[in-house]
Every structure is written in structure tokens, then in C-alpha cells.
């Protein structure tokens, strides 16, 4: 950690980190709820958004749900005082960077190759921006790999579930599974950049 510059993690590094698994589980369960809420926009109002504002409008609506709901559920991933506001100061720029790169890759390359490219680029952007906001880059490469693997597992398993389930139930299930993978990865990332001595 760079001690010469203000760090969002500076008031929490003295806390005992314990095992990473409870943090991973908290992130996974919490973001699974958020994922279902965001994907419910697609499941319940997708036709309306496509008619009024197209695919881009639907993406923006889902993004706003992700941003608005995440802090309410997951702000405890940030240790120390004022965790709610500090969570948003970390998560919002990280998730926006992730979402922008995801959309660029997906709209440019489409399904398949575009999804894998989006997952990789979006994962690196999310982890790198989170490291920047915490002021801590130790463990960055490992965090990128872990986040990419968990995020991709959630996204693609969720996609397969939707193909099997179909309809709004499949869409909500995709949100649940995607959210768990993303949130588990986020839990690991937040744990890594707040770990004492890291």
C-alpha cells in the first residue's frame, strides 16, 4: 500500500481479516439478490424498454438498479466507519468501468466471442479500479484471475440456466446465478485489498 497518499483502506487495515470465505459468501449472496432485482427490469419490463429506448435503454436501467441497490446490501464489505458512503466511492467507478467495457465488447462482437471478451475486459477494469480506490495494488493479478473466473462462471452458468428454464423465470435465475458469481468475486477482491499487511 502506498502510505504517501490517502487510502480508503487506511482506517481498516488494522482490523483482523480472518478467513476470506465469509466475505466471499456475503458478497455472493448479497449480489445475487441485487442481480435478481436488476434482471427483473429485463424480465418484467424488457419489451417496454426495447420499444421505447432499445437495448441501450434497458442496459442503463439495469445499471441504475445495480448501482442503487448494491450499497444497501453490500456496504459492510468495506470495513471501518462510514462504510456505506465509502462503499459507493469504490463500487460506483469500478462498476461503471466494468459496465462500459462490457457494453463496448458486447455491442461490437455480439454473443460468444463478445461475451468472453467483455467478461475479461470488464473483470480487469473492475478489479483495477477497486485497487485504485483502495490505494492498494498488492495481489492485483491474482484478484483479476479469481474475479474473472467467478464472474464468468456466474454469467455463463446463468445463461445456460435461462436457456433451460426460459421465460421470466429463466431471466431471474440468470440474474441470481450471475449475481452470485460476480458478488463472490467482489467479496474476494474487497477482502484482498483490505487485508492487513497487504
Image: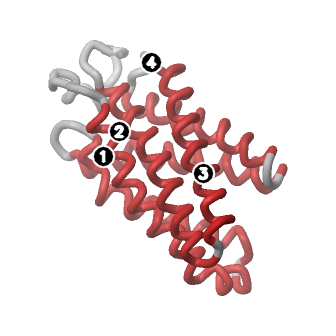
Name the residue tied to disc 2. 24
Labels 3, 2: front one? 3
Which residue is rendered at x = 30% and y = 27% of the image?
A: 194
Q: Secondary structure at mark 4?
A: loop
Q: Secondary structure at mark 2?
A: helix
Name the residue tied to disc 1. 26
Labels 2, 4: front one? 2
Work out how far the residue at label 4 is from the one at label 1, CA to CA, in angstroms: 21 Å
Q: Which mark is residue 157?
A: 3
Neighbour tally class for label 2: few under 14, some 14-19, many 20 plus, Cα within 10 Å: many
Labels 4, 3: front one? 3
Residue 78 left/right relative to 90:
left
Labels 4, 1: front one? 1
Disc 3 and disc 2 in contact, CB within 8 angstroms = no
Q: Earlier in the sequence, mark 4 or mark 3?
A: 4
Labels 3, 1: front one? 3
Work out how far the residue at label 4 is from the one at label 3, CA to CA, in angstroms: 27 Å
Neighbour tally class for label 3: few under 14, some 14-19, many 20 plus, Cα within 10 Å: some
Disc 2 and disc 4 in contact, CB within 8 angstroms = no
Q: Of all residues shown, which one is farthest toward the front?
A: 164
Which residue is rendered at x = 81% and y = 44% of the image?
A: 113
Disc 3 and disc 1 in contact, CB within 8 angstroms = no
Q: Secondary structure at mark 3?
A: helix
Answer above or below: position of 96 versus 117: below
Name the residue tied to disc 4. 139
Work out how far the residue at label 1 is from the one at label 2, CA to CA, in angstroms: 6 Å
Residue 88 left/right relative to 119:
left
| Rendered-image quadrant of the C terminus | top left
Work out how far the residue at label 3 is from the one at label 2, CA to CA, in angstroms: 18 Å
Amino acid at each position: 500500500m502506498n502510505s504517501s497518499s490517502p487510502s480508503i483502506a487506511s482506517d481498516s487495515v488494522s482490523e483482523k481479516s480472518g478467513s476470506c470465505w465469509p466475505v466471499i459468501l456475503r458478497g455472493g449472496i448479497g449480489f445475487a439478490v441485487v442481480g435478481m432485482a436488476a434482471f427483473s427490469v429485463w424480465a418484467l419490463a424488457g419489451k417496454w424498454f426495447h420499444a421505447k429506448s432499445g437495448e441501450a435503454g434497458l442496459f442503463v436501467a439495469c445499471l441504475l438498479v445495480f448501482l442503487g441497490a448494491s450499497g444497501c446490501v453490500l456496504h459492510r464489505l468495506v470495513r471501518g466507519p462510514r462504510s456505506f458512503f465509502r462503499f459507493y466511492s469504490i463500487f460506483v467507478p469500478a462498476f461503471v468501468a466494468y459496465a462500459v467495457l462490457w457494453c463496448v465488447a458486447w455491442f461490437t462482437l455480439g454473443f460468444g466471442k463478445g461475451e468472453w471478451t467483455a467478461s475479461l475486459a470488464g473483470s480487469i477494469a473492475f478489479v483495477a479500479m477497486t485497487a485504485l480506490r483502495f490505494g492498494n495494488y498488492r495481489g492485483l493479478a491474482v484478484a483479476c484471475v479469481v474475479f474473472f473466473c467467478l464472474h464468468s462462471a456466474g454469467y455463463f452458468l446463468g445463461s445456460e440456466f435461462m436457456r433451460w428454464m426460459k421465460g421470466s423465470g429463466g431471466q431471474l435465475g440468470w440474474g441470481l446465478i450471475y449475481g452470485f458469481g460476480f458478488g463472490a468475486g467482489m467479496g474476494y477482491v474487497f477482502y484482498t485489498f483490505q487485508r492487513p499487511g497487504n
